[in-house]
Amino acid sequence: MSTLGHNLLPTPTTGGAPTQTGSGIGAIFSNVWRNITDTIDDGLNDIGNDIADKLAHALGVSQWYSMHLMDMCEGNFAPNASTPGAWLNVTNCTGQAPPSK
């Protein structure tokens, strides 16, 4: 589905705070805490992403839009957006002339 509303919580791979390096017991606890919070953030993002997907589907939001000089197209990724090598599946394009009144 559309990525509208996806990844609302920052993670180290999506622009979160840089990780600290070090040694000793403090670094161990810091790493454990970071792993716990990253897992929670990832879980919350997954829930948020699922809600965003369902909302976008319910509202009829396409996964991609393409605007051209004389028309506009929309569609979804096939078989889905996260599949390697996914292609664009065009579901609708506007006409090349303005609608008559």
Image (cartoon, rainbow, N blue to C red):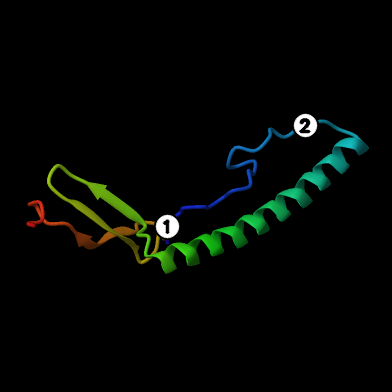
Quadrant hosting residue 25: top right
Quadrant hosting residue 85: bottom left
Q: Which residue lies furthest to the front in this view?
A: 101
Q: Distance between the residues labelled 2 and 1?
A: 36 Å
Q: Earlier in the sequence, mark 2 or mark 1?
A: 1
Front in this rendered view, residue 81 or 93: 93
Residue 69, percent from left and from top: 14, 42
Q: Which residue is drawn at 46% across and 53% down?
A: 4
Residue 61, percent from left and from top: 37, 60
Relative vertical location of residue 61 with respect to residue 8 in this rendering, above or below: below
Q: How crowded is mark 2: few (under 14 residues within 10 Å), some or many (20 or more)?
A: few
For the N terminus, the image quarter is bottom left
SS type, badge 2: loop
Q: Residue at x 82, y 30 (%)?
A: 22
Front in this rendered view, residue 87 or 75: 75
Residue to which mark 2 is pinned: 21
Question: How many numbered marks does the figure carry?
Answer: 2
Residue 53 is left or right of residue 16, and the answer is left
Residue 97 is left or right of residue 54, and the answer is left
Residue 78, percent from left and from top: 33, 64
Q: Residues within 10 Å of mark 1 (few under 14, many from 20)?
A: many
Please name the amino acid that badge 1 sits on: Ser
Q: Residue at x 90, y 34 (%)?
A: 24
Please name the amino acid that badge 2 sits on: Thr
Residue 60 is left or right of residue 88, and the answer is right
Number of the label disc, if any, that sits on residue 2: 1
SS type, badge 1: loop
Front in this rendered view, residue 76 or 100: 100
Residue 46, percent from left and from top: 60, 59
Q: Residue furthest right?
A: 25
Number of the label disc, if any, that sits on residue 57: none
Q: Residue at x 22, y 55 (%)?
A: 73
